[in-house]
Amino acid sequence: MANTYNLSHESLKGLFGSLRRDGRRILAPVDAAGRVELGEVEAPSQVAADYLQTILSAKEVAFPKVERLLSYTIAPGRVDLKDAEPRALPTVLFGVRPCEAKAFGALDAVFNWDYRDKFFNARMEQLAVIGLSCTKADEACFCTSVGGGPADATGSDILLTPIEGGYLAEVCTEKGAAIRALAPDLFRPGNGVDKAAIAAKVQQAFDQPALTSQLPGMFENEVWADQALRCIGCGACAFVCPTCVCFDIQEEADPKKGERLRCWDSCGFHQFTLHASGHNPREVQGARWRQRVYHKFSYYPERYDMLGCVGCGKCTRACPVDMNLKEHLIEAAGVKA
């Protein structure tokens, strides 16, 4: 069970100083010309105030858009390979929402399923997450429909909930305890504040267990083609999603040298499943949209015993044609399989 403390605004300034003296960079939501995105900060005053969500997710901290896996040189009669080593900096991810913090568990399931990915794990070992409970939500949020909540501590090493004069601080993990140990006097005994009364209210939108159980019988249902009529296959949903983990392996080379790269990809792209023969098992957008829903709500639970969606709503906010995931899931849940 988490240990609960009070952390004043002034004490938070001191904690930032302690983290930096400990050699850690601090990444937090910042206001960048009206857009809230992650950036490196030195003080709490630089953190975006009262924001809803960052536009992009925090997954890039552990799973970069482009990452070199190996390099090679080519000479007459030989090829020399050199494995890339992870570049993992001690990092504190501060002020991310509970859905973002929870999403790292979904990434971990993939990168440690039957093979331990040294690049992802090196970054996660150096990462500590200080989450911030949500005090407001919008119509795109549906965390409570997928087992989360505006003040859910899952995935956070420390979870902060705003209270008068500062924060309620829940120290949830050993990493969180190590952060507190840097400046224990800054953390005062908790005063029994009910964080649920402070957190945003997000109504459950659909019955997720029922949806997951009926999806296997809905594979050929016309609902997927109907929902995908607006989709233009741009991939914005995948690139802002904190749990999407699809990637491609590409080579950048010339006759004498080259490197192998891992790059973000999306199952919504036409070429994602295109075979060298020219055959494409997901030729139409409806099949690709269906794959996105099934991956998150059927295949993930079957394989990892968790969902591949945290209900953050980033995909809905980013979609240029208003493919509202929550509304589509409500519709799918109402279909008789």
Image (cartoon, grey):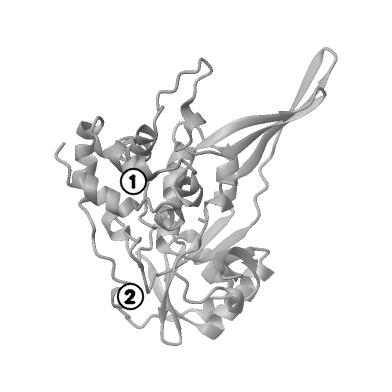
Which residue lies at the image location 48% right of the left edge and 60% below the top edge? 174
**Residue 26 in view in this figure:** no
Q: Which mark is residue 307?
A: 1
Disc 2 element: helix
Q: Going by the picture, which residue comes out furthest to the right? A: 76
Q: Amino acid at mark 2?
A: Lys
Foreground residue, 36 or 306? 36
> Are circles 2 and 1 on residues that touch, CB within 8 Å?
no
- Position of residue 194 relative to residue 227, above or below, is below
Q: Going by the picture, which residue comes out furthest to the bottom? A: 165
Q: Earlier in the sequence, mark 2 or mark 1?
A: 2
Disc 1 element: loop
- Position of residue 296 relative to residue 39, above or below, is above
Which of discs 2 and 1 lies nearer the camera? The answer is 1
- Position of residue 154 relative to residue 79, above or below, is below
**Residue 79 in view in this figure:** yes
Foreground residue, 152 or 145? 145
Label 2 CA crowd tier, 10 Å (few <14, some 14–19, many 20+): some
Q: Which mark is residue 195?
A: 2
Which residue lies at the image location 64% right of the left edge and 41% below the top edge? 67
Residue 72 image offset from top left, x and y in percent: 76, 27
Label 2 and label 1: CA atoms lie apart by 25 Å
The mark tally for this picture is: 2
Q: Amino acid at mark 1?
A: Leu
Residue 34 image offset from top left, x and y in percent: 56, 70
- Position of residue 218 relative to residue 126, above or below, is above
Q: For this view, does 314 lie left or right of residue 184?
A: left
Which residue lies at the image location 37% right of the left edge and 50% below the top edge? 323
Quarter of the rendering occupied by the N terminus: bottom left
Residue 240 image offset from top left, x and y in percent: 49, 52
Which residue lies at the image location 20% right of the left edge and 32% below the top edge? 217
